[in-house]
Image (cartoon, rainbow, N blue to C red):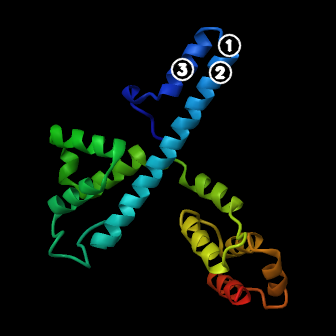
Amino acid sequence: MTCRDPSQITPSVLIMKSLIKNQPDLNDILIALNQLQLDSQTLHQENADLKNTLNQLHALGEMNGQYREPKLQPNHYPNNQTQVGLLGSLLMGSALAWFASLLEKQSELLDDFDMLVKELKAMFGDADKARTATNKIRKLIQRSRLASSYASEFRQISGDLDWKEATLIDQFRTGLRNNIKDLLLILEDPILLNDAISKAVHCDN
């Protein structure tokens, strides 16, 4: 887990330290809990913003595994400088402020795109991505939407997991509506997640 800079201590941490030092009343405790919730929501949004930014980067430049040599638009992002500039233009919030500080001090990170992305993920990414994805996918259910929509969200979340196919299939089927589960019982058990999704979508049509 990434350690936070002392200058980045959140309001909730300061409030909680104050509560420990001073004997609080119920109102103080409620205020502290509310601030903790706000900090948690902010951190979650920043993690989501970073993921969306990196996805935008892939879409605009479609760089290979190490974010090099854009394939879709090579004339627009041909070198390290243009790639760093593109990344900076997509950042928001605290990640943008961090990037601006690198520009001000002319950091060496600006000369190495791969290291810049790595440091960005370490600073602002989800420190426990697998656990977050696990919690999300365990709670994911189809409800009244189409199986194809449920499957799309399931695929997105499962991309952050290193689960075996059988485990993914079992979790996918768990979240389906009961009427679709019943229809799947008469079909052959799938071996791959893609097969399980195809059969569920077919049963939902």
Residue 50's x, y, as percent?
40, 54
Inspect this view and state whether residue 9 appears.
yes
Residue 69's x, y, as percent?
23, 72
Q: Residue at position x 23%, y 42% from top?
A: 100
Asked which quadrant contains residue 155, the reply is bottom right
Q: Are marks 2 and 1 in contact (CB under 8 Å)?
A: yes
Residue 195 relative to residue 185: left or right: left
Q: Residue at position x 29%, y 57% from top?
A: 90
Q: Name the residue under label 1.
A: 25
Could you say whether the residue bearing mark 2 is in a helix, strand or loop?
Answer: helix
Q: Where residue 29 is drawn, which disc sits there?
A: 2
Query: How busy is the neighbourhood of tag 2: few (under 14 within 10 Å), some, or many (20 plus)?
Result: some
Q: Which amino acid does label 3 sit on?
A: Ile
Residue 176 relative to residue 54: left or right: right
Q: Residue at position x 41%, y 46% from top?
A: 124
Q: Name the residue under label 3.
A: 15
Q: Could you tell me how far apart the alpha carbons at marks 2 and 3 are, in whole angstroms?
A: 9 Å
**Mark in the foreground, 3 or 1:** 1
Query: How busy is the neighbourhood of tag 1: few (under 14 within 10 Å), some, or many (20 plus)?
Result: few
Figure check: 175 above or below 110: below
Query: In this figure, what is the number of numbered marks?
Result: 3
Could you say whether the residue bearing mark 1 is in a helix, strand or loop?
Answer: loop
Q: What residue type is labelled 1?
A: Asp
